[in-house]
Image (cartoon, grey):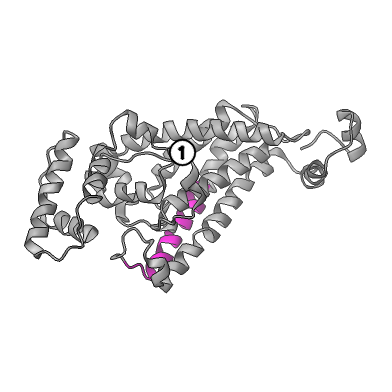
Amino acid sequence: MLPFQSIQEAESSLGRNLKFAENLWFKYSANKSDYFLYCHNTIFLLVFYTLLPLPYVIAELLRSNKIERFKIQPKVNNSFKDMFNCYKNVMTIFILVVDTLAPSLEGSETFSIGIRTGLPLPSGTEMLLQMLVYVLIEDYSNYWLHRLLHCKWGYEKIHRVHHEYTAPIGFAAPYAHWAEVLILGFASFLGPMMVPGHMITFWLWMVLRQLEAIETHSGYDFPWSITKFIPFYGGAEYHDYHHFVGKQSHSNFASVFTYCDYIYGTNKGYRYRKSVFGKVPLKHPVHFLVRLNYIINLQYKIAASVGVHIKLNAVQIEKQYHQCV
């Protein structure tokens, strides 16, 4: 809650007239508690995770040839019922876990760590720099938490739920075990804890984080996406590989940027696969068994390149075959 009773009092304290955005902020937040302003994040969560995936849902239902060529796993079809069930499950987790437990755990700490709600509002440069710090902190911490969830116990008890979608969709971005929602949610909250800013910066960060997660899980790789111009950005194709490989995946753990995977060598299988598939004409009309034999050998080469011994079963081979051809 702002410590001013009127705009005139605020302007007198600042020694200048309020800017347009500051006027709006004063009128909206003057009589609202800091905790109430913090809880706006839960509203944003529900609204944005409802609206932002809708274009991908429409694309999935229309299956237009113009859009279909950008689908990463074109042989996978998702019905409206499948996508709605995913959305319903996600909203249930949000309401039962995030909207009840998270505010009680985090809301009381929000302002003790320095997140402010008063005036003046942060400049555009200040917000941009803080957002950059938040991305880097979240990216690094999420990488290791995500990698930890792929250990035997973490995967079987928690992370396997998220990997039920081997071909992810926008609504599946937060589809996960309730414990994973809190664990990886902590990574998003860590940046504002370490470098606290204004509540508006905090809101914007949470919204952009949701937007990135939905785009990464969209299942479509559009060449005109603005993220194509961001250096080291992973994107939908990069993360789709992680889901496609599934439980055996020890590759592409990155949240936003790919530098951690590169530094720690957890993208070797992905890079090898891309280099081979970029050179081999898989559309060439050769015999089915020849193709299948090629896929089997390729899987073992990928595993060997990252120092992992695997034993492929028929289901895994079939999945890889249909993805490639």
User: How far across and how far down the image is residue 62, in percent?
Assistant: 43, 73
Residue 80 appears in view: no
Image vertical order of residue 7 relative to residue 195, above or below: below
Q: Give the SS element for disc 1.
A: loop
Residue 54 appears in view: yes
Left or right: 214 with respect to 133?
left
Left or right: 123 with respect to 241?
right
User: How far across and how far down the image is residue 269, in percent?
Assistant: 23, 41
User: How far across and how far down the image is residue 11, in percent?
Assistant: 89, 34
Q: Quadrant of residue 172?
A: bottom left
- Disc 1 residue type? Pro
Left or right: 316 with respect to 173?
left
Image vertical order of residue 319 relative to residue 245, above or below: below
Main SS category, magenta section: helix
Q: In front: 223, or 190?
A: 223
What span is colored magenta in the figure? 77-98
Q: Residue at x 21, y 44 (%)?
A: 248
Q: Residues within 10 Å of mark 1 (few under 14, many from 20)?
A: few
Residue under numbered circle 1: 231
Does 91 appear in magenta?
Answer: yes
